[in-house]
Amino acid sequence: MGLLACLLGLCALIAASKCSYSPEPDQQRTLPPGWVSLGRVDPEEGLSLTFALRQQNLKRLSELVQAVSDPGSPRYGKYLALEDVAELIRPSPLTLRTVQKWLRAAGAQNCHSVATQDFLTCWLSVRQAELLLSGAQFHRYMGGPEETRVIRSLYPYQLPQALAPHVDFVGGLHRFPPTSSLRQRPAPQVAGTVGLHLGVTPSVIRERYNLTAQDVGSGTTNNSQACAQFLEQYFHESDLAEFMRLFGSKFVHQASVSHVVGKQGRGRAGIEASLDVEYLMSAGANISTWVYSNAGRHEAQEPFLQWLLLLSNQSALPHVHTVSYGDDEDSLSSAYMQRVNTEFMKAAARGLTLLFASGDSGAGCWSVSGKHQFRPSFPASSPYVTTVGGTSFQNPFRITNEVVDYISGGGFSNEFPQPSYQKEAVTQFLKSTHRLPPSSYFNASGRAYPDVAALSDGYWVVSNGIPIPWVSGTSASTPVFGGILALINEHRILSGHPPLGFLNPRLYQQHGAGLFDVTHGCHESCLNEEVEGEGFCSGPGWDPVTGWGTPNFPALLKTLLKP
């Protein structure tokens, strides 16, 4: 009898495995360094999960993005409204009906969709969620510099096989909030200070990139810019006011953020949050600025995913968004990255410019089957965002030419193929560079990044009322480049042209016109005998360290102001 029972049990397991599937089998599920488990979550506790529903007409969406972003296309600049995007990619009636019926049967409550109907966020008890998502076990974890608490499952989840054509993935199970990679470097030693600067400030940025006191927003357009924050960090208006008092007296600027989306926490200000706001508003001076804040989110929600949902649910958005979030590609599931990439396509179709930091680990490094490889970062590697690398001054105390900042993230994606807009530039780099790492270290046919760069070394930031020097990272270069693009949008709007939208096709067609080419320096990588800590090196034209280079505002304005 016992043998028969065992056989029946084994058959049931086999049948169950054939009737279910894992949407994210390749998602990393290890606990990040510095995080600890606080134990299983009470089965009756509620949690919020986000279901990414399968979209339609993605090939058509890709074609439209190409058409509205290519200056040679008759549709250039004729962006889609949110309603148009929703009409195009909305999940099929069968998908909507199937998923909603499944969730209702599981006891899901308070389900909320977005305008595009391709995300569904629902509340369930932990008990219901673990029954719904076979294999999941929810624990509460604490970690990060802010001792953030989250609810996650380190176990893989499975869905009924019947849902395979309808659900891309479920958010709120595996991915932990990112941690900031900003560094405060020691000040370089120098004798005497006559004619020297003592760190990067708005005046230094504006002098290096040729912005005059007149290069500010007019205050007469509907132009706007935004930064998004996912680190449980907050900016303080008093810090912004003190920063502008110290460093903003030479140009017209706005005294406060125009719009905060989400709640501003009451905790201490974070250096990264302060940096984002202060340099976006001083590079893109006198332009209406939004801040997307993730304070007060539920412990089971993924901050970055919540930001994507906001983009899918707001018809009027700032034209430029700067984001400093990033993860290693290999830590994320292919289903997740592909779906997030589609969200970026939706933004591009609507004429939004999304700028992402390239990361602060150079080419990165990890070991695959005992062999070292470079480690690309996402979303920096998405073909539908503009990725910003980092530079330093050749002389750290003088406003001189720029060289590579050794931390500047860059490389080649293992997930996304090389988009057509950059094939010529990448081929030229691979053919002409004399210091190429071994081919086994990178995927030469992948999306190559970054696209552009800006100073990332030695910034002054005001946080919690205190001026802090020598803050460094591509989290600094990204809002600077974003603010400069927002200024160019101001001129385009005043001239009757649409905003820039997805910049990369135009950027590569123009071969870096309007940018200072950065041709000296290499970034860091694997510390082994084969590459000795050196990744890629910069050179003439595009390279996977600083892209096409850093902004020369008058020249960049001239080339991007043309219709």
Image (cartoon, grey):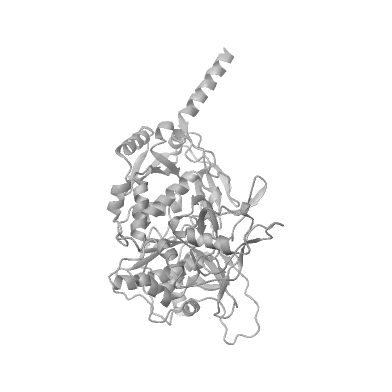
| Rendered-image quadrant of the C terminus | bottom left
Residue lying furthest top: 1
Farthest residue to the bottom: give it.
194
**Residue 147 in view:** no
Looking at the picture, does residue 557 appear above or below residue 39? below
Image: 141 above or below 220: above
Q: Position of residue 57 (x, y in %)?
A: 34, 45
| Number of marks present in the image shown | 0
For residue 554, side relative to residue 466 (left or right): left
Give the quadrant of residue 160.
top left
Q: Is residue 316 left or right of residue 504?
A: left
Res 505 → quadrant: bottom left
Location of the N terminus by quadrant is: top right
Q: Position of residue 419 (x, y in %)?
A: 45, 55
- Percent position (x, y) of residue 446? 52, 53
Q: Is residue 455 left or right of residue 492?
A: right
Using the image, determine if residue 314 lies above or below residue 164.
below
Relative to 105, residue 540 above or below: below
The answer to whether one can see residue 123 in this image is yes
Residue at image position (55%, 63%) is 429
Q: Residue 316: x percent and y percent?
A: 30, 60
Q: Front-most of 405 and 556?
A: 556
